[in-house]
Every structure is written in C-alpha cells, then in structure tokens.
Amino acid sequence: MDVKTQKQLLEYLGPEYEPKVIDGEPCLYRRLNELYEIEISRSESLFHTYGVYIWHLLREGRCPVEMVDMKSDIFSRSTLKKHLDAMVSQYQNRV
C-alpha cells in the first residue's frame, strides 16, 4: 500500500487504526485486545484489492501466532469498512 493510499484510508477508517510495516509491507494495523489484532493490506496487482487478516496473539500481546480470519479481494473502501466492523464486533470482546 503506497503512502498516499495509506493516509487516505487512515482518514476514512478513523483513529483506531495506525500505519505499520508488517513483513516489509506498509499496512494498517489495529490492536483489538490482548489476544487479537487486525492487519489491512492492499494488493499492488491490477485491481488493487484490500485484504484483512485477524491474528491471534501468543500470551497477551506477543508475536502473532495464527491467522484466525481473513477477507480478501475487497474492491472498495465502503466494503472494507463493513468487513472491518463485522470482524471487530466478532473478535474485540474475546479474551
């Protein structure tokens, strides 16, 4: 995800998200609680689709251990936001 897209998406999604480089790729990140975090990436392929990944963390905030949910091939910011809202509702209160 390029810096311009990252800034625009941050403005659209709100202050809960922050820019972060994950595996060498600029992404957006949100910590949901001690056990789950969200990673948002954007494909640089022809269609520039978004992907959302929910990671389960090892022991209260340490390294991501397992991807527990994923949505890919998201074409618009509005669809991305709908998926994020649903995923946040599903995982935010799990501990």
Image (cartoon, rainbow, N blue to C red):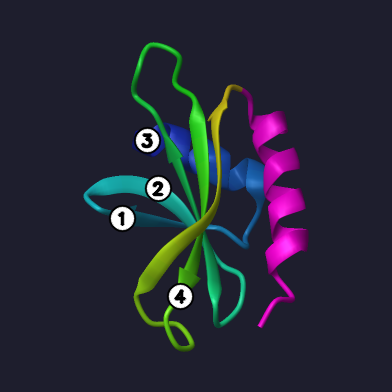
Dot 1 surroundings within 10 Å: few (below 14), some, or many (20 or more)?
few
Furthest residue to the top?
46
Alpha-carbon span between mark 2 and mark 4: 18 Å
Name the residue beneath numbered marker 2.
27
> Which residue type carries mark 2?
Cys
> Which residue type carries mark 4?
Leu
Task: Give me the disc on residue 1.
Answer: 3
Nearer mark to the viewer, of 1 and 4? 4
Tell which circle, 1 or 3, labels the residue nearer the N-terminal end.
3
Would you say the residues marked 1 and 2 are in contact, meaning their CB atoms lie under 8 Å apart? yes
Would you say the residues marked 3 and 4 are in contact, meaning their CB atoms lie under 8 Å apart? no
Q: Residue at x 54, y 78 (%)?
A: 35
21 horizontally vs 41: left or right: left
Name the residue beneath numbered marker 4.
57
Residue 17, horizontal then vertical, whole percent: 56, 58
**Quick one: SS at disc 1?**
strand
Q: Residue at x 25, y 53 (%)?
A: 23
- Asked if residue 44 is positioned above or below residue 17 in the image, the reply reads above
**Quick one: SS at disc 2?**
strand
Tell which circle, 1 or 2, labels the residue nearer the N-terminal end.
1
Would you say the residues marked 1 and 3 are in contact, meaning their CB atoms lie under 8 Å apart? no
Task: Please give the range of residues in magenta.
Answer: 76-95
Name the residue beneath numbered marker 1.
22
- Asked if residue 74 is positioned above or below residue 61 in the image, the reply reads above
